[in-house]
Amino acid sequence: MHMLAYIKENLLAFKERRFAKRRMAAMLKSHAAVRAEMPELSDLALYKEVLLRTPSIDPSAVDQILWQAEDSVDEWTARGTGKLGFRQLVTFVIMSQYRAAGNVGTVVSLKEIVYARIPEDL
């Protein structure tokens, strides 16, 4: 039985990583497109446009997502700036979508996956 639990946990971890990487890839693709087309955008205006172009996000929910993501940022997650960054937004979106899909928690740290692949200054 111990081996079965180990296998289940590894499969779940694989599923979570795959979910996070796919969502992150879509958001990074949208980010690159927005930056190329509208280099003058920054911060919330940039993030709003990225969300609007991300296929897995309902356009009518973008303002609510931004508000909730901003509300979830604190001094610790924003490294003392208290400001929503792209990495925090991506982490928030991935976690929200993962939970909305009926998942209660995670085996892996979705934040670590995102922070390892997205530069702080993006």
Image: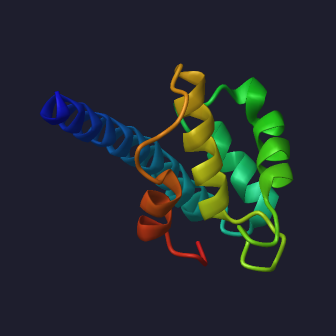
Which residue is painted at 60% across and 24% down in the image? 100
Q: Is residue 40 above or below residue 94?
A: below
| Count of numbered badges drawn on the protein | 0
**Residue 20 appears at what percent x and percent y?**
43, 45
Image quadrant in which the C terminus is located: bottom right
Res 16 → quadrant:
top left
Front position in the image: 96 or 32:
96
**Residue 110 appears at what percent x and percent y?**
48, 51
Res 6 → quadrant:
top left
Front position in the image: 106 or 81:
106
Q: Can you see residue 16?
A: yes
Front position in the image: 112 or 86:
112
**Residue 111 appears at what percent x and percent y?**
53, 58
Which residue is painted at 50% across and 67% down in the image? 115
Which residue is painted at 24% across and 32% down in the image? 5
Q: Can you see residue 56?
A: no
Q: Is residue 88 left or right of residue 72?
A: left
Q: Is residue 71 above or below residue 6?
A: below
**Furthest residue in direction left, as rendered:** 3
Res 1 → quadrant:
top left
Q: Is residue 55 above or below residue 47?
A: above
